[in-house]
Image (cartoon, rainbow, N blue to C red):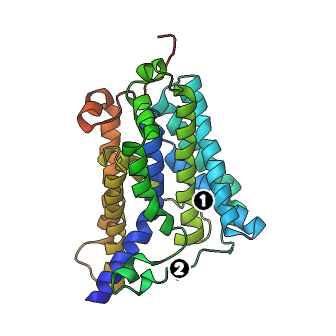
Amino acid sequence: MESAVIFVAKITITSSMAVLYATIGEIFTERSGVLNLGVEGMMLVGALTAFAATDCFQSLWVGVLFAMLISGIFALIHGFFAITFRVNQVVSGLALTLFGIGLSDFLGRPFIGKVSLKFEPFGLFPLDKIPVVGQILFTHSALVYPAYLLVPLAYVFLYKTRYGLQLRAVGENPSAADTVGIPVFPMRYLYTFIGGALAGLGGAYLSLAYTPGWKEQMTGGQGWIAIALVIFSMWDPLKALGGALLFGFINAFQFYCQAAGLTLIPSYVLRMLPYLFTIVVLIVITRWEAAKKRVGAPAALGIPFEREQ
């Protein structure tokens, strides 16, 4: 029984990391007032870039850095249209996802089936020696452990620091923030880049650690799940962690049922459950003006800022 619990718990953590990184990044972006629905495209670009750069330079960390940089630049494409040209942010984000899917599929063809370096799991001594807990939390690859710090640091930054207060002010009332000297446009660009970089980190985790290698559309919709988790977490990093772990647990439970030969719930039903969240999110987005006050969204989310007004 204990081994089953450890197995499910470990898979829960490893399955949740990519979507967790992307969710935290999108929280930062949306807290600045920019709605970016291009997370799926950015994750795919990050996954391909990480694998290609690692294969080229034979360095895993170079691959991760390239993934974060390129995905961040990719996010700035959306930022350029959404912040500077003030186009419809839903349309721009969807276009970014479609562009990312097409670009990664086209450029990634030479890498399909290719083998490269990967992050191997290792014990984080001496924490891995703690009974049960050590095996669950501290025997993962190097891209898992930064998430343990990212979530609390993101929470403290948002709610306990002056910079976090400025970020929330830009997302709630950019006109008032601009009046007191907070640079609205640079901050929106900055956090759009950060959101893209973290989405790229999630993609790098997929291609270098979780399922090492490259295949077309390997994110499997996790970018959309990240957008859903932002809303369900009410733009709070700690609640986002819970949502990401729930997503990971559904995947882990599915794997356990398959490994144990259990057929209590059909596997296709289990695989379907996380994506029901996406349907709910799309419904919420279509009724955005009526819904955003109810769920606690930043008041200026998706609304272009015009200084002249």
Camera-nearest residue between 126 and 35: 126
Residue drawn at 37 percent across, 71 percent down? 12
Badge 1 vs badge 2, beta-carbon distance below 8 Å:
no
Q: Can the viewer see residue 211 in this picture?
A: no
Residue drawn at 54 percent across, 67 percent down? 143
Q: Is residue 90 above or below residue 7?
A: above
Residue drawn at 31 percent across, 66 percent down? 270
Disc 1 from disc 2: Cα separation: 19 Å
Q: Can the viewer see residue 172 in this picture?
A: yes
Q: Quadrant of the N terminus?
A: bottom left
Q: Residue 97, how many percent across, how many down?
A: 54, 44
Position of residue 263 in the picture relative to residue 302 (left or right) = left
Position of residue 101 in the picture relative to residue 157 (left or right) = right
Give the mark toward the camera: 1 or 2.
2
Camera-nearest residue between 155 and 273: 155
- Residue occupying the far right of the picture: 56
Q: Residue 165, how many percent across, how many down?
A: 40, 36
Q: Secondary structure at mark 2?
A: loop
Q: List the residue tagged with mark 1.
A: 47
> Quick one: label 1 or label 2, which is nearer the N terminus?
1
Q: Residues within 10 Å of mark 2 (few under 14, many from 20)?
A: some
Q: Residue 261, how many percent across, how many down?
A: 31, 85
Q: Is residue 77 above or below residue 41?
A: above
Q: Residue 2, how many percent across, how many down?
A: 28, 88
Q: Amino acid at mark 2?
A: Pro
Q: Residues within 10 Å of mark 1 (few under 14, many from 20)?
A: many
Asked where in the image residue 244 lies, by quadrant, the reply is: bottom left
Q: List the residue tagged with mark 2.
A: 121
Camera-nearest residue between 279 and 161: 161
